[in-house]
């Protein structure tokens, strides 16, 4: 089943926010294979973090990832207006040697 | 430059079979250990991973949709085809194809998506 994310997170410009992604030992907890995607309305998702902590070339270092147990986290520091978007986590799962997305989090910049 | 583009019918009827084609450029599926996934997103809802085709023709499917999906190479070497049988209005969604470099388990390039509506 889908990984669990908070439905919404908000912050003021310049602040830091953290989005959690909770799974189980068969997915998030068992493998360092969590990635994060940013999706603006009407647009395709964009990869911003892979393998828990790695950033693709060109992605701002304001985005960072971590993991503790069965929960992965995405932190956005120095929040900017353009960070307002939906964010999804994604992980390999050993169940069916398959993959699963998170439920998604809407980030609002106040 | 890596690009992917989805194509297929915008409207299908319930019980019909949907066939979508992903046409890509900028990488090879046969020689560069790349994979291509299909992912969908119902209007206003979360992303859902559907299937993946690997460079060596290995396939992986969503456990919940496995019986309805087939992913395969297209007639051209730069195409990946997804078929989904017994379509239902609940399958109305934007369907994306995306590239996944083998080993990263992350989709680094996406198509723009194609909206498929299931209606009588």
Image (cartoon, coloured by chain):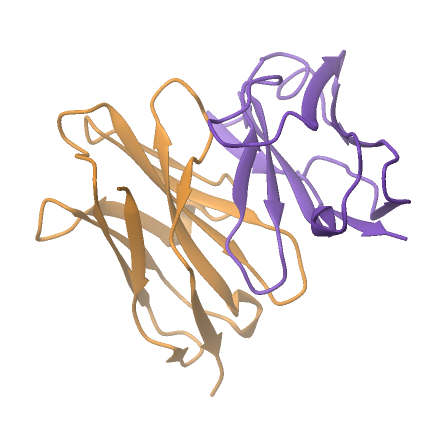
Q: Position of residue A91 (x, y in %)?
A: 57, 28
A32 to the left or right of B100 = right
B101 to the left or right of A70 = left
Q: Position of residue B85 (x, y in %)?
A: 36, 62
Is residue B64 in sight in this rendering? no
B107 to the left or right of A59 = left
Count of numbered marks: 0
Q: Colour of chain B?
A: orange
- Which residue is at 49% across, 32% downward? A58
Outermost bottom residue:
B120
- Which residue is at 55% across, 23% downward? A55
- Which residue is at 65% across, 41% downward? A88
Is residue B81 in sight in this rendering? yes
Name the residue nearer the viewer: A62 or A42: A62
Q: Position of residue B70 (x, y in %)?
A: 30, 49
Q: Quadrant of residue A12?
A: top right
- Which residue is at 39% across, 41% downward? B109
Q: Position of residue A102 (x, y in %)?
A: 67, 39
Name the residue nearer the viewer: A98 or A58: A58
Quadrant location, the N terminus of chain A: top right
Q: Colour of chain A?
A: purple
The image shows residue B58, relative to residue A82, as above or below, that is: above
A12 to the left or right of B107 = right
């Amino acid at each position: 089943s889908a990984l669990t994310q908070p439905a919404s997170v908000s912050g003021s410009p310049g602040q830091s926010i953290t989005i959690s992604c909770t799974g189980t030992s068969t997915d998030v907890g068992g493998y360092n294979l969590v990635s994060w995607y940013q999706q603006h309305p009407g647009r395709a998702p964009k990869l911003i973090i892979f393998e828990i902590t790695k950033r693709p070339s060109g992605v701002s270092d304001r985005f960072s990832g971590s993991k503790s147990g069965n929960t992965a986290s995405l932190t956005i520091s120095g929040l900017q207006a353009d960070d307002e978007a939906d964010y999804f986590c994604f992980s390999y799962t050993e169940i069916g040697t398959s993959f699963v997305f998170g439920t998604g989090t809407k980030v609002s910049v106040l | 430059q890596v690009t992917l583009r989805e194509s297929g019918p915008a409207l299908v009827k319930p019980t019909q079979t949907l066939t979508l084609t992903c046409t890509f450029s900028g990488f090879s599926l046969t020689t560069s250990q790349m994979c291509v996934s299909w992912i969908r997103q119902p209007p206003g809802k979360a992303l859902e991973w559907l299937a993946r085709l690997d460079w060596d023709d290995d396939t992986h499917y969503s456990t919940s949709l496995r019986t309805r999906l087939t992913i395969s190479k297209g007639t051209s070497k730069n195409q990946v085809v997804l078929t989904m049988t017994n379509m239902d209005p609940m399958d109305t969604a934007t369907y994306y194809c995306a590239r996944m470099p083998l080993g990263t388990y992350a989709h680094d390039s996406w198509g723009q998506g194609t909206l498929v509506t299931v209606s009588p």
